[in-house]
């Protein structure tokens, strides 16, 4: 079963626009991570936000976390065609074995040039 | 490039057969996790190995089994393949909280 739900499932924007993806989860977490996947290949780690953090930035990426609402958002600013990919949130929780990740269903982002 | 490699890249099997997938972890990483990703869905955790011992398992039947070797490389074995086993299988080696994923093996079961 999936821990998180991502919203929207698909997003299409023009180059230069901002893209916002949301993730909701069900149980308590140690941290929440965002990953990117191109064309059904390997996942690339983008950013990790711990449960005691509310916002984190990395380049054009901004992640927020609201543990009271069990939700997170990923904002990509000034999008580029190369940002076209699927984006997944994944949670690591206190009850997870090892550092097992529980993924959401993903948002498919298309950035049109 | 994450330094995690998987083989083979693609594989086609028929129902009832057995398959072995391989993963070489990033240098220095002693933990390997395996995930199954069905088409259009997020990855689902199969199991994790730490220093050659299983260190957690997801909701997968016993016909999914694994091994980790002294050099921390790993294998995923699936017996009695079913059509629903068709998926992308990803391995990830980890250091602290960050997991480094390989490119995956695409398994098709006919």
Image: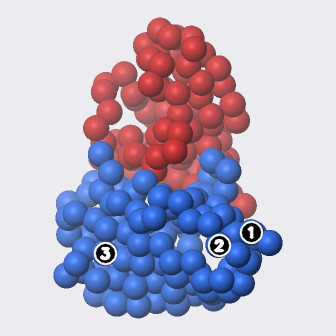
The reply to whether discs 1 and 3 touch (Cβ–Cβ < 8 Å) is no
Q: Quadrant of the rendered structure where residue B104 is?
A: top right
Q: Which chain is blue?
A: A
Q: Quadrant of the rendered structure where residue A86 is?
A: bottom right
Dot 1: few (<14), some (14–19), or many (≥20) neighbours within 10 Å? some
Is disc 3 placed on a helix, strand or loop? Answer: strand
Is the N terminus of chain A in the top left, top right, bottom left or bottom right quadrant? Answer: top left
Image mark 3: chain? A
Residue drawn at the location 60% of the way across and 83% of the way down = A18
Can residue B96 be seen by looking at this rendering?
no
| Mark in the foreground, 2 or 3 | 2
Q: Which chain is red?
A: B
Marking on residue A112: 1
Residue A55 pos. (x, y %): 41, 90
Q: Quadrant of the rendered structure where residue A76 is?
A: bottom right
Answer left or right for B14 relative to A30: right
Residue B107 pos. (x, y %): 59, 28
Residue drawn at the location 33% of the way across and 60% of the way down = A4
Q: Which residue is mark 2?
A: A13
Is disc 2 placed on a helix, strand or loop? Answer: strand
């Amino acid at each position: 079963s999936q821990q998180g739900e991502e919203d929207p499932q698909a997003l299409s924007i023009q180059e230069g626009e901002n893209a916002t993806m949301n993730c909701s989860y069900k149980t308590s977490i140690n941290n929440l991570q965002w990953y990117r996947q191109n064309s059904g290949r390997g996942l690339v780690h983008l950013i990790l936000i711990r449960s005691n953090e509310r916002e984190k930035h990395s380049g054009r990426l901004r992640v927020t976390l609201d543990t009271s609402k069990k939700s997170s958002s990923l904002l990509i600013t000034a999008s580029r065609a190369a940002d076209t990919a699927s984006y997944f949130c994944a949670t690591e929780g206190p009850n997870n074995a090892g550092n097992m990740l529980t993924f959401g269903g993903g948002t498919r982002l298309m950035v049109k040039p | 490039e994450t330094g995690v490699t998987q083989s083979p890249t693609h594989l086609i099997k028929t129902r009832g057969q057995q398959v072995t997938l391989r993963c070489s972890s990033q240098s220095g990483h002693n933990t390997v996790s395996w995930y199954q990703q069905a088409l259009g869905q997020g990855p689902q955790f199969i199991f994790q190995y730490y220093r050659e011992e299983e260190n957690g398992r997801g909701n997968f039947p016993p016909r999914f089994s694994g091994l980790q070797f002294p050099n921390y490389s790993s294998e995923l074995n699936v017996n009695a393949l079913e059509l629903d086993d068709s998926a992308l299988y990803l391995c990830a080696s980890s250091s602290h909280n960050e997991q480094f994923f390989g490119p995956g093996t695409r398994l098709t079961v006919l």
